[in-house]
Image: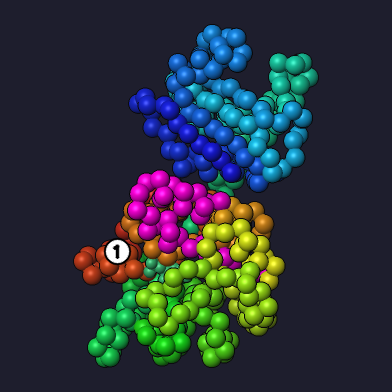
Amino acid sequence: MILLRSEYTGSHHISLNRLRKTAAAVLRLCGHTSSELSILLTTDAGIQALNAKYRQKDRPTNVLSFPMQEETNPPAGVMLGDVVISVDTAAAEAGERGRTLRRHINRLLIHGLVHLLGLDHERSEHEAAVMAARERELLQKLQEYERKKPMPILAINIDHVATLRQARCINEPDPVLAAGICELAGASGIVAHLREDRRHMQDRDLRLLRQTVKTKLNLEMGAAEEIINIALDLHPDMVTLVPENRQELTTEGGLDVAGQLDKLGLVIERLTNEQIPVSLFIDPEPKQIAAALEINATFVEIHTGRYCDAVNAGEREREFEMVAAAAEQAYSQGLRVNAGHGLNYQTTARVAALDTIEELSIGHAVMARAIMVGMDQAVREMLQQVRGIYS
Ligand code: PXP
């Protein structure tokens, strides 16, 4: 877990999301996915005060490290310590060396982290050489990783188009047509929930979607025998299992996977035997991730509803951290990770920036905007949110 704070208030813009992502990637490259790291961005005055207090050097510097572990190569899963970076000095050095500030801060972060892992260039020339080599290696791997990292894909949930049609029980608007427009606008997947009560999607829709969707059809469904048989027959590109409750307006919480291991395990087995990968829609809770692994789910979809519905900034931050930590836990243990529910034009970019997320499933916000601006434009605008941080 990365604890990232900034007390820097100067004119250089630093994307904290991006730095958090970089730090998580570097931790992973060091085999410390489950360890904690604290990072503070500060000013020259801030770092000078720390340098004077803890190192008796009353001057600013670029980076300071405060290890929590005494040994060299501490084990994974521990609090490694603090890295403090002065953005003022970093910016001046970046200018002198002709680097971007972001790249230079990445170098300083790696330098500080290697200190926390027990190496110290001040101890001997030999150790200085070992440390420099380790830093070069990590920097190179980070660059390769950043080049390789694909951005998450956007899958559009089209249930609401069917909801509108069913309000009149006629044949328009047609969700099958809507799916085509979403794909033309750049969506990489279509999600449709076939509920037992057929309140929106109908069997006919799924049959036609199977024939016409060119990207990827994700069938969302409860684990009911009738629907499982339809899925086996339809053969969607993947299935997302969700809890289904007849009284709910939309899917409420995540699945209690831990509480129904046998039942869900069997459903996963039946679907994966037919080469249909299964995702489990879960709340961001460690025990649900462990349970999903135990019963061989291919994906989990982390429920983002509480993050999106948060009523104040503090609550939103806490909920976001839970989503980020759950995604990290699932990804680092080998699950593929999707996320969704409640995401809109304000809350999506931050989740899309997590380097653990493969696919975002978004419905309501896009449909609500589509009524105002048209489906094509609403999907394109959401794609900008998904991709924005990488441009
Ligand atoms: N993911 C799952 C599992 C869902 O049940 C839903 C809602 O149908 C979504 C994502 C999309 O949520 P929203 O419509 O709020 O974007």
Three-letter code, disc 1: Ala
Q: Is residue 175 above or below residue 119?
A: below
Q: How many marks?
A: 1
Which residue is denoted by mark 1 in the rendering? 378
Q: Position of residue 54 (x, y in %)?
A: 60, 15
Badge 1 density bin: few <14, some 14–19, many ≥20, Cα 10 Å: many
Q: Position of residue 273 (x, y in %)?
A: 68, 81
Which quarter of the figure has residue 165?
A: bottom left
Answer whether residue 8 is magenta in the image. Answer: no
Please tell me whether residue 138 is drawn above or below residue 124 in the rendered image.
below
Within 8 Å: ligand 1 and the Cβ of disc 1? no
Classify residue 136 by image quadrant: top right
Figure quarter occupied by ligand 1: bottom left
> Is residue 282 shown above or below 8?
below
Q: Main secondary structure of the magenta part?
A: helix
Q: Which residue does the image show at 66% across and 59% down from the upper left?
A: 334
How far from the left and from the top, in percent, is residue 13? 38, 32
Question: Residue 318: where, in percent of width, then height?
Answer: 46, 48
Q: Is label 1 in a helix, a strand or a loop?
A: helix
Is 323 magenta? The answer is yes
Q: Quarter of the image containing the N terminus?
A: top right
| Residue drawn at 36 percent across, 76 percent down | 249
Query: Does residue 153 appear in this view?
Result: no
Task: Say left or right for 21 vs 312.
Answer: right
- Left of 162 or right of it: where is 113? right
Along the line of sight, the residue nearer the viewer: 198 or 19: 198
In percent of the image, x 78 and y 19: which residue is there? Answer: 126
The magenta segment: 296-325
Residue 16 visible in rendering: yes
Left or right of 195, for residue 264:
right
Residue at 22 percent across and 65 percent down: it is 373
